[in-house]
Image (cartoon, grey):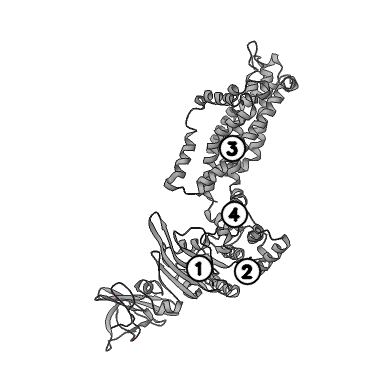
Amino acid sequence: MGLELDRVTKRFGGREVVSRVSLTGEDGEFVVLLGPSGCGKTTLLRMIAGLEAPDEGAIRLGGADITAKDARDRDLAMVFQSYALYPHMTVARNIGYPLRVRKHNAAEIARRVEDVAARLGLRKLLENFPRQLSGGERQRVALARAIVRRPRAFLMDEPLSNLDARLRVEMRAELKHLQHELAVVTVYVTHDQAEAMTLAHRIAVMRDGKIQQYDTPSNVYHRPANTFVAGFVGSPAMNLIEQGNRTLGVRPEDVELASFEQPGYTPARVWVTEEMGNETVVVLSAGDRQITARAPSGFRADFDSPAWFRFRAGREHWFDSSGQRIADPA
Amino acid sequence: MKTTVRYFASIVAALAALAPVYWLITISLKREVDQFAYPPRWIAFHATLQHYAEAFGGGSFAIYFLNSVALAGMSTLAALLIGVPAAYGLARFEWPRRWDQRVGDWILSTRMLPPIVTIVPLFLMLRGVGLINTLAGLAIVYTGFNLPFVVWMMRGFFDEVPREMEEAAMLDGDSRAGALLRIVLPLVKPGLAATAVFCLVFAWNEFLFALILTQTEAAMTLPVGIASRVTQYEIQWGAMSAAGVVAMLPVLVFASAAQKYLVRGLSLGAVKG
């Protein structure tokens, strides 16, 4: 009885940006909408929030139809990409705003703001204005404002994308823990597959307004439903090789390398190596295609030096001519 | 060298701008015999306050002054009360078939005709509803003239405020009106102040409509009142100057109080942040 989308469709000027999307998020579930920009994920989130009205379909929360309800009556909290903090209010007043407009009494507002601020490490900043805060602190204030009341769902629109890389990873973990503690259904929009993999209970991979696959991170990674999902999730991306009317997919970690000729291995040349510290990504050029492989960190090879590779047995993914996964490769 | 030239140029410009003001103030303080003495008495003259007593003692300029205050206040308030929500609506809601653009252009177009051509129709209409020679009638006319200005200025300021501000407020449980009052208006305060000052100054200085639409003493405004001292037999330079000086004061006070906002308001959007 969490969040339920039933064939939700949205058109902008005749163009369908979200097409018959159905998905459910159980109570306490962390759902991530993942896709490239323009895939309709943000529009979908805005429809859940009540900021856009769907042209067709229904949105239910806790069993009740909220499709026609105003944003303010849906009892959801949203964290925006830009944080949307109120610049003319102190941190304390920003966090307390949802309670003030709901006419809670001053003592209770003060207590709850204090609680949330303590939880997110904002106590020293309560009297500051948003412009005096760093990006990470603003992010925390936006989170605090979202959790200060107990909403029935959290919506997050790329909340970490304005942070630097280190802080993003830190906040990611914090966010995951926080969501676990609050146990409220959360819909999180991102184009970053690493964020999606680490945060989600289930990922909805979207393209062109349609859900390509809605499944656990593990299944999305290990059993991608089509070539789009296969190529979008995972870094470095899966090798997709057309063979006749089918496509073969092999993850870089399932490409085995050798520096001398061996039976069953295909010859190639090293196009580039990328030292990552814990591993080395090797891009080979074999004929007119490139094959990406992951090698241990000690792997060394010069540009254009010869190398041999093979695909680890039993780890191939097969897709048909329309790009759909073939359950039983022949 | 460059600095010297700049200073010199700004001093010349300042003198050119301030000389008439200085002349106005000194005339208001000079006895009649000194007013047109030749060579002019720039500094050394016998100062007197008799013209101020003449102008305001008899009561008529005091009435004009209060009339102007009431008129400027009413028309500015009305223009803001009607224009701000209209501007917000145009800035935030997309109307089908781009009607928001068209309505905006239509509102602007009402500023494109020379005001004088509306005098006769306005006179007839006001007479028809019995508002000729009343402050209320004039206030309606001024409101009408300020409205397009308010709508266009405020629409620009509203465009500068990210939509996410209100969206966040509405998700936090506020109504759209509440978000406008508590979130958006405080953010466009500089723009609002600048717009209000322009409306006030327009209403305060307006002469043409006031002259034609109000002909009784009871509804006369300062600019008209001052001009009425040019009579068939004499020109009361002293009293006119005294009233002119007093007429400048409210604008000066208001503009300097709002100066911080004026500069920010007028440059809002030009420079981010």
Marks 1 and 2, Cα distance to the nearest angstrom?
A: 19 Å
Residue A211: x %, y % from top left? 41, 69
Q: Which residue is mark 1?
A: A188
A192 or B85, which lies in front? B85
Q: Quadrant of the N terminus of chain A?
A: bottom right
* Secondary structure type for disc 1: strand
Residue A35, quarter of the rendered image: bottom left
Q: Name the amino acid type tagged 2.
A: Leu
Chain ID of residue with mark 3: B
What kind of residue is marked 1? Tyr
Marking on residue B79: 3
Q: CA distance from mark 4 to mark 1?
A: 25 Å
Residue closer to the observer: A215 or B59: A215
Q: Which mark is residue A144?
A: none
Which residue occupies 52% across, 54% down? B163
Q: Is A126 inside the magenta-drawn segment?
A: no
Residue B49 in the figure: left or right of residue A154: right
| Residue at image coords 60%, 59% | B173
The crowd level at tag 1 (other Cα within 10 Å; few <14, some 14-19, many 20+) is many
Q: Which residue is under mark 2?
A: A120
Callout in the foreground (4, 1): 4
Q: Residue at x 56, y 67 (%)?
A: A153
Foreground of the two, B66 or A183: A183
Residue A316: in magenta span: yes
Disc 2 to disc 4: CB gap under 8 Å: no
Q: Which residue is mark 4?
A: B175
Tag 2 subunit: A
Comes first in the chain, label 4 or label 3? 3
The answer to whether tags 2 and 3 share a subunit is no
With respect to residue B41, does B161 lie above or below?
below
Magenta highlight range = A311-326
Whether labels 3 and 1 belong to a single chain: the reply is no
